[in-house]
Image (cartoon, rainbow, N blue to C red):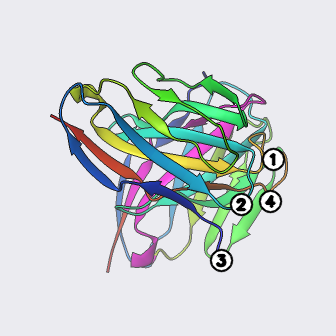
């Protein structure tokens, strides 16, 4: 079954305690990205990756790091979390990002709800 | 980063009614996608449109891409309670970034 998995699904932590949210896809997709979803602000892209070892900033990258050492995994790292990073996070993957055909599909993970106290 | 304006922001209708949701921008899109998101889950892709003027149908859902590729609409005929959810549009302009609208929260009352 084609899927994007994220762990953990829920996390409560304290300010300054480093954490990693894992993301894995089983579709051999080249493109992966991370989004955060906040009430009234919608989905905003944090980072994206076009392939292994190729990453770039999205619209809201401050306070986050990513790595892409393997094609299937794209972890999101918060080195020193702060309360304003409390949010719902989604990982997504697709074969390519430039959706030039109507069959191009982007798959989202189930989300990670993060609370930073 | 281009801006995508979705309207209305909230919509509450009775089962069996029709509705239309809009997604507009001042920028030209290379492609546009519509997603539906249910509480506690990730967005699920409904359709991708890539050609100006394109109309696609998915059962009771009709998607239209504007001729100038700056806007799109989603029309639902005879809404059902199962259509309840957050509808999101997302667009790409040829770069590696997708921009999402803020969404339309639809409630269909039985």
Of callouts 3 and 1, the N-terminal one: 1
Asked if the stretch drawn in magenta spans residue B87, the answer is yes
Q: Nearer the viewer, residue A23 or B1?
A: A23
What residue is rendered at 60% in x and 47% in y? A73
Report the disc number at residue B59. 3
Report the disc number at residue A33. none
Asked if the stretch drawn in magenta spans residue B62, the answer is no
Q: Which residues are magenta?
A: B80-106
Q: Quadrant of residue A18?
A: top left
Please state if B18 lies on the left or on the right of B14 as rendered.
right
* Residue A88, horizontal then vertical, whole percent: 35, 45
Above or below for A77 versus B15 = above
Q: Quadrant of the C terminus of chain A?
A: top left
In three-dimensional space, the C-alpha distance between marks 1 and 4, rounded to whole angstroms, equals 10 Å
What residue is rendered at 79% in x and 35% in y? B68
SS at badge 2: loop
Q: Which residue is mark 1?
A: B50
* Residue B4, horizontal then vertical, whole percent: 56, 33
* Residue A28, horizontal then vertical, whole percent: 75, 55
* Residue A89, horizontal then vertical, whole percent: 41, 44
In three-dimensional space, the C-alpha distance between marks 3 and 2, rounded to whole angstroms, equals 27 Å
Label 3 lies in what chain? B
Q: Nearer the viewer, mark 1 or mark 2?
A: 2
Report the disc number at residue A103. 4
Label 4 lies in what chain? A
Graded by Cα atoms within 10 Å as few (under 14), some (14 to 19) or many (20 or more), the crowding at tag 2 reads some
Label 2 lies in what chain? A
Q: Nearer the viewer, residue A84 or B30?
A: A84
Q: Which residue is mark 2?
A: A27
In three-dimensional space, the C-alpha distance between marks 3 and 4, rounded to whole angstroms, equals 17 Å
């Amino acid at each position: 079954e084609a899927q994007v998995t994220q762990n953990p699904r829920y996390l409560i932590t304290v300010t300054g305690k480093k954490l990693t949210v894992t993301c894995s896809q089983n579709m051999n997709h080249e493109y992966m990205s991370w989004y955060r979803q906040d009430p009234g602000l919608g989905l905003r892209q944090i980072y994206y990756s076009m392939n292994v070892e190729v990453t770039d900033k999205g619209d809201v990258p401050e306070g986050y790091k990513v790595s892409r050492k393997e094609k299937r995994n794209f972890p999101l790292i918060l080195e020193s979390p702060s309360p304003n990073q409390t949010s719902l996070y989604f990982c997504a993957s697709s074969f390519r990002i430039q959706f030039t055909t109507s069959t191009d599909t982007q798959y989202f993970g189930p989300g990670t709800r993060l609370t930073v106290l | 980063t281009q801006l995508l304006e979705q309207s209305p922001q909230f919509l509450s209708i009775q089962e069996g009614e029709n509705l239309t949701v809009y997604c507009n921008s001042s920028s030209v899109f290379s492609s546009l996608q519509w997603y539906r998101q249910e509480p506690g889950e990730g967005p699920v892709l409904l359709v991708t449109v890539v050609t100006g003027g394109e109309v696609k149908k998915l059962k009771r859902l009709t998607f239209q891409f504007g001729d100038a590729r700056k806007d799109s609409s989603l029309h639902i005929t005879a809404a059902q309670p199962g259509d309840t959810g957050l509808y999101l549009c997302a667009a790409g302009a040829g770069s590696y970034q997708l921009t999402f609208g803020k969404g339309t929260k639809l409630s269909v009352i039985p």
